[in-house]
Amino acid sequence: MNIAIELPEKASRDLLRSLHRQLRAAIVDGRLKAGVRLPPTRALAKALGISRNTAIAAYDLLLSEGYVEARGGAGTYVIDLRPRLTRPKAPPPDPEADTRLASQWRGWRPVKEFCSDQVFRYDFIAGVPSMAFPFDIWQRLSTRAARQVARRKVQERDPAGEYSLREAIANHVSFVRAVACTPDDIVVTGGARQAIDLIARILVTPGQTEAAIEDPGYGPTRRSLEIAGAIIRATPVDAEGLVVERLPPSARIVCVTPSHQFPLGVVMSAARRRALLDFAASFNAVIIEDDYDSEFRHDHQPLDALQTLDRAETVFYVGTFSKSMFPELRVGFVVVPRWARYALTLAKQLNDWHCPLITQLALADFIAEGHLARHVRRMRRIYSERHRALTEAIAHHFDDRLQLFPAHAGVHLAAGSDSLDDRRLVVKAEAKGIRVEDIARYAVRDIDQRGLVFGFGLIRAEDIEPAVKILARLA
Amino acid sequence: MNIAIELPEKASRDLLRSLHRQLRAAIVDGRLKAGVRLPPTRALAKALGISRNTAIAAYDLLLSEGYVEARGGAGTYVIDLRPRLTRPKAPPPDPEADTRLASQWRGWRPVKEFCSDQVFRYDFIAGVPSMAFPFDIWQRLSTRAARQVARRKVQERDPAGEYSLREAIANHVSFVRAVACTPDDIVVTGGARQAIDLIARILVTPGQTEAAIEDPGYGPTRRSLEIAGAIIRATPVDAEGLVVERLPPSARIVCVTPSHQFPLGVVMSAARRRALLDFAASFNAVIIEDDYDSEFRHDHQPLDALQTLDRAETVFYVGTFSKSMFPELRVGFVVVPRWARYALTLAKQLNDWHCPLITQLALADFIAEGHLARHVRRMRRIYSERHRALTEAIAHHFDDRLQLFPAHAGVHLAAGSDSLDDRRLVVKAEAKGIRVEDIARYAVRDIDQRGLVFGFGLIRAEDIEPAVKILARLA
């Protein structure tokens, strides 16, 4: 056995531990190869100048841990660990077929999102905000928060979120969105995604509950509902938002993005809003209002949240800091109807107990000290400029080949077309270093809605006109 | 209308926005009370020196948002928002009964955990580690991580976790627990709790899948399985850990804490480990190994993880940094069998996309730079000292009225008793400023297991003897 073993000059207790550890390490990292015969305990003891009992004890431990096997009188041999130590990087061909998985989880693969290390010359990816964020301020507040956490006595950590944060959020949404709520109405979540996932969990009875979603719409919302066992009812969207008249009366959940439809960008009209609230009230349905980027408003038409108009506690208002701050933060929240407060808080508690505390405390200060409002104001100016540049460039270069959907908020625009071969344009554009997506990418059914989605979170204002010009030439 | 309105000297566009905002704010915060009649638009325009059209437009917006109502020719009146603005703090009497909730979510309330701002003179709460943590180092690494995030180009954010973190975790567990894995086998989660919650989601077919749990055992694991729809099979625990012979062959999931049973603290014997792995292999069952605090070992008997001995990919190894660092961090991980890798990664993606990025990058460095290993070594010494003090104090003061369960790891001990009225002792102790829990608190069925659980994460070594002395007198 040609491996170096160094033992402490200590009590046999430490000797044994040390010897066992070193032997095991040698086996795990392959210095002791499979099939190698360990020296007889007597020989090992002599070589290392330790008692034979220590050597025997060490071998016994390796034996009980399954690293070596005793072949009768033939001695002690290293077991072949390779099958486990050198696992192939890729999963086996068809892991999803394994019957140990609950059936609804078979045959799925994780979805690639923003999956491109490729840097684009012009990037119109939608749903990704600018990374211009005051990280220095954020870290200063985080450091302060860490000190608070360090000083804390053990106490209840509320799954719904730290009270100071819920207070700050309640003030924030009351002010910017006229959403009427108290801290007790709020549950802090790991982004809007966890919010919708947990809401789906508490509302959906698998195989029974029907959920209406916007078509085209936001993929992850659909998938969370599907995996929760909901029956999906794709409902069309037009220039006034979700076509409420087309809602199946059997729908018990309605998911909407009324302030800035994803991906079309349209604002739901006041009439449709009232109709939707009436629908929910009369059919005892629930509305999930995903208000993901409405802080960035580009004109004077601030239609209020459904939650603000709701009189029957039918609306779950979902907000996020992914767009107003940065997505990697993973914090969002729900303004919960009272009847669902316990259930949603419990769902959060069972899912991951609560959001990371340092983040919660830092965010509470970030909002309370006005940093969020300042940052949103600043970004609104930047996004409005890009919004304008994009609107003008498309009108100018595409003429009537692309019709912009009216959008007054947020970080993306969409444009429809009857003539355009959008798929082909997307591919040709990528070859020219331009990333832009076609509307159909967000379709639930095979909708004939043709057109493109232009995100402007990443592209600079001055780059927009040149990029659109190239696109128009490619079209 | 006696509210101050200040308007900018700007284009009518800004005038309208400003006027509408101020009126709405006045209504929301109650300066304009319900039922108040707004001045006629002509009068308002005159008073503010603006065009009448601007006043009309502002009223129209308030109308469309539902803040005011037009009473025929009688004018415009403020609507009563109070029912929504002054929601009672407490939820209505029986919110869980609401039929809009999926049935399995009705009748539940969030569970209070560590719910006590009351500071105890002597605190033996279990499952709570010491808060002695190098937060200064942590914040330094977080600040560096924030800079990395700020510099990032948009790219795929892997739901399974940042590769650098999974690499660090893989090396860490291979070293301290001889768990053989590559970064690709790891999914980073929001604590062990989210790990178990997501595993339950992908394995449980509601109403069908039977899950065996330790009795007594860890409550949240049981609740996550229940809410996922599993049929719970409580299985007894003795001094050798889970009594494998008592497992119902119909169990398809077996949850265990083999390194340090919660709450009894016993180590699962090598024989039982082999038996459990055989059980899983022969019945095509899955083992969830919750290895929550085994880094803190108090003797030379390092029994390896079940995952290390597993040859059939039946084990989900769940680790956490809640005990080795601090619980408010909310980071844990799973070493996933390859056949479940896609499903678990997708479950994480649908649930909350990924863990906060700054935390992930900071943790990767914290581990890679050896800070974790150092901290664990330091805490192991501290906990071992408390472990010894507790063992001696109980033996000395309780004689044979309490028999300690053999425990070689972790941050708590348990002691059984035939004679002791443990419930009564717990209550009497609290009155004397001592927090200690009885084993029955963790029972799933009505087990007759009497005794106490002594956590030593919070109590200092020198306080242990005096505290136990008082307890013994109260007993």
Image (tube, coloured by chain):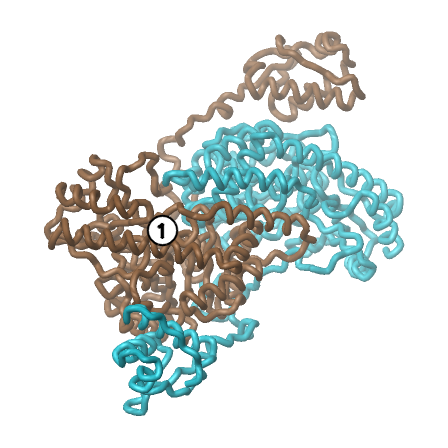
Chain colours: A brown, B cyan
- Quadrant where the C terminus of chain B lies? bottom right
Q: What residue type is labelled 1?
A: Pro
In the picture shown, does residue A83 fall above or below A258?
A: above
Judge left or right: residue A336 versus residue B297: left
**Residue at the extreme front of the image, as rendered:** B9
Residue A388, position as x, y percentages in the image: 25, 55
Q: Which residue is drawn at 41% across and 75% down?
A: A312
Disc 1 marks which residue? A220
Give the camera-side residue of A372 and A238: A372
Residue B309 appears in the picture as rendered:
no
Q: How crowded is mark 1: few (under 14 residues within 10 Å), some or many (20 or more)?
A: some
Judge left or right: residue B383 versus residue A291: right
Residue A379, position as x, y percentages in the image: 37, 53
Q: Residue at x 40, y 71 (%)?
A: A308
Give the camera-side residue of B355 and B436: B355
In the picture shown, does residue B316 fall above or below A205?
A: above
Dividing the picture into quadrants, the one containing residue B390 is: top right
Residue B196, position as x, y percentages in the image: 53, 46
Residue A303 appears in the picture as rendered:
yes
Q: Which residue is drawn at 36% across and 64% down?
A: A253
Dividing the picture into quadrants, the one containing residue B273 is: top right
| Mark 1 chain | A
